[in-house]
Amino acid sequence: MSMSEYIDFVLDRTENMYNIVQYEGHGSFWMVFFIGILFGGIIQYTRVDKFEKIAGFAMGKDTIIPKMLFLAIGITSIALYFAIKMGYASYHVKPMIISGLVIGGILFGISMAILGKCPGTGPVSIAEGRVDVLVGAVGGIFGGYVFTKYYDTIFKPLMGENHGKISLVDVSGEHATFFVLLYGIALIIIAIAIPKMELLDEADLEQLEK
Amino acid sequence: MKRRLPWWLGGILMSLLLLFTFSVFGADRPIGASTYVPYYAGILFGMDPEQYTYLQEIEKPGAWEGVMLLGALVGGLFTSVFITKSFRISVMPSAWKRYKNNSVKSRLVWSFISGFFLIVGARLAGGCTSGHFLSGMSQTAFSSMIFGGVVLVTLLITGKFFYNKGASK
């Protein structure tokens, strides 16, 4: 591929990305962009994109991440259940690919502790000027490349058998309302009960004092 | 203006955003934030989607998340410049300096390696903190609970052994 062919390719693919989102029926381009702005804004404003929050949690010195995460999941699980009952939304459950989940989870957990970011908070950190995370993102792009290239030969077989899309709502059948309430309330209680610990970034504090 | 939102307000706002995104008024789908990486890798490395089954599989979610990511960058930049005032160019997190080492090279090499495996791991599992934790566990999905449990345990074990106590310095 020559340089000009490459540029054409990138432009074509980018235009294609716009067209897919605009006409796929999951929100217009601007709607999805707007969701992204709010997503980035909430992460940034609560400062959970910080190394001190995620790596700090891994070190057992900060608990803002699990508190916020479990609270959000607890509330959403209950509200989403009723929104779906009323026909305003639907479930999009991910499949049970046991070895993929376990091997992937182990790699993900180790990497998240070291990088101090996940794929959602990383970009927000980069937007905040963190060069080390940008280097991590370059690593991630290479990871994405290798995964795509060897998907059929290495990664797909590694993911193992697909046991279908199962959730608590499915298995509890007619008692689903009870179990979802129990699950959601339990998560909210856990979020509140986790002792609040914070590891602060001295460099941020200095910046605020200026 | 407050420089930082408390965790409970952040949790409530994130929940509202998730509900909006799930609803037919928003995008009628969950939030995810790791499929965009192989999607962009495909674009940057000039990979023809017709030759790679994975690119075909992620064509739609990849594009959706690709656009959401652009929004997240704008939202993050805007908030860090005007609200949290935390925007600054830096290569070394303070806590890395205190609990790991003082070497920029070490931080960057580890960043690259962990960034690489972060994405490989997320794609093997079919989701990340957003797709599995936030969106998946909100749907009471068992796959997401398994992923969540494994990640929590490995995260805490890694944190314990990778970093040092760093009491002095």
Image (cartoon, coloured by chain):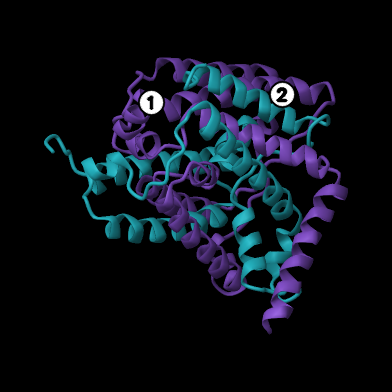
Chain colours: A purple, B cyan
The image shows residue B119 at horizontal and vertical percentages of 51, 56
Which mark's residue is nearer the viewer, 2 or 1? 1
Q: Which of the 4 image quadrants contains residue A7?
A: bottom right
Marks 2 and 1, how far apart at CA: 41 Å
Label 2 element class: helix
Image point 33% across, 25% down: which residue?
A: A198
Which corner quadrant holds the N terminus of chain A?
Answer: bottom right
Q: Is residue A172 something one can see in this rendering?
A: no
Residue B161 in picture, x, y percent from top left: 23, 46
Residue at the location (55% across, 57% down)? B124
Residue A208 marker: 1
Neighbour class for label 2 at 10 Å: few (<14), some, many (≥20)? many
Q: Which residue is found at the position 61% from the left and 22% from the top?
A: B13
Q: Which numbered disc flags the more N-terminal residue, 2 or 1? A: 2
Quadrant of the rendering where the C terminus of chain A is positioned: top left
Q: Label 1's element?
A: helix
Q: Can residue B136 be seen from the camera position used here?
A: yes
> Considering only vertical position in the picture, is A8 above or below B38?
below
Amino acid type indicated by mark 1: Leu
Q: In the image, which disc is placed on residue A81?
A: 2
Which chain does tag 2 point to? A
Could you tell whether B150 is left or right of A97 in the image?
left
Q: Amino acid at mark 2?
A: Tyr
Judging from the image, mark 1 belongs to the subunit labelled: A
- Rendering coords of residue A21 (x, y %): 80, 49
Is residue B56 placed above or below A186 in the rendered structure? below
